[in-house]
Amino acid sequence: MLEKEEIFSKVLRAGRRTYFFDVRATKADDYYITITESKKFTEEDGSFHFKKHKIYLYKEDFAAFRDILDEMTEYVLNQKGEEVISERHQKDFKKEFFTEKEEVQTTTSYTDIDFDDI
């Protein structure tokens, strides 16, 4: 499928990912939207490449798409809030674990064990 020139575009940069939102025209001069996720990958030698994934969204699907997207984002925010909880997004992230008898414990250090000592 040959893509036509963008009519209207927006870009969202989000860390290693970039999202491109583009309005394009069909051959019949009707409009549709493409959403492209571009993710940067760096190789060991310092070179890099991008992987891209694209969604084509046509007008007849806009309302249903928007309804489901709104429902899904509302669900996530209601369940987990807006705070990002991820090692990749928070440098001071500490893994927490639960035991039946104890409350939340935070792992901050590890002990090296030499199996010759056992």
Image: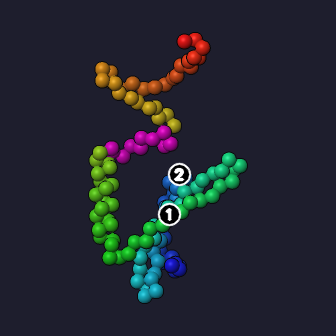
In this view, 54 is above or below 4: above
Residue 84 lies within the magenta run: yes
Q: Residue 102: which quarter of the image?
A: top left
Q: Secondary structure at mark 2?
A: loop
For the image, the number of numbered tags is: 2
Reading the image, the residue beneath label 2 is 15
Q: Nearer the viewer, residue 22 or 56?
A: 56
Q: Amino acid at mark 2?
A: Gly
Q: Residue furthest top?
A: 117
According to the picture, the residue beneath numbered tag 1 turns out to be 53
Tell me which numbered mark, 1 or 2, is placed earlier along the sequence: 2
Please tell me how crowded label 2 is: few (under 14), some (14-19), or many (20+) other residues with Cα within 10 Å: few
Residue 108 x/y as whole percent: 49, 25
Residue at x-position 52% and y-position 22% = 110
Q: Which region is colored magenta? A: 80-89
Depth check, front residue: 63 or 47: 47
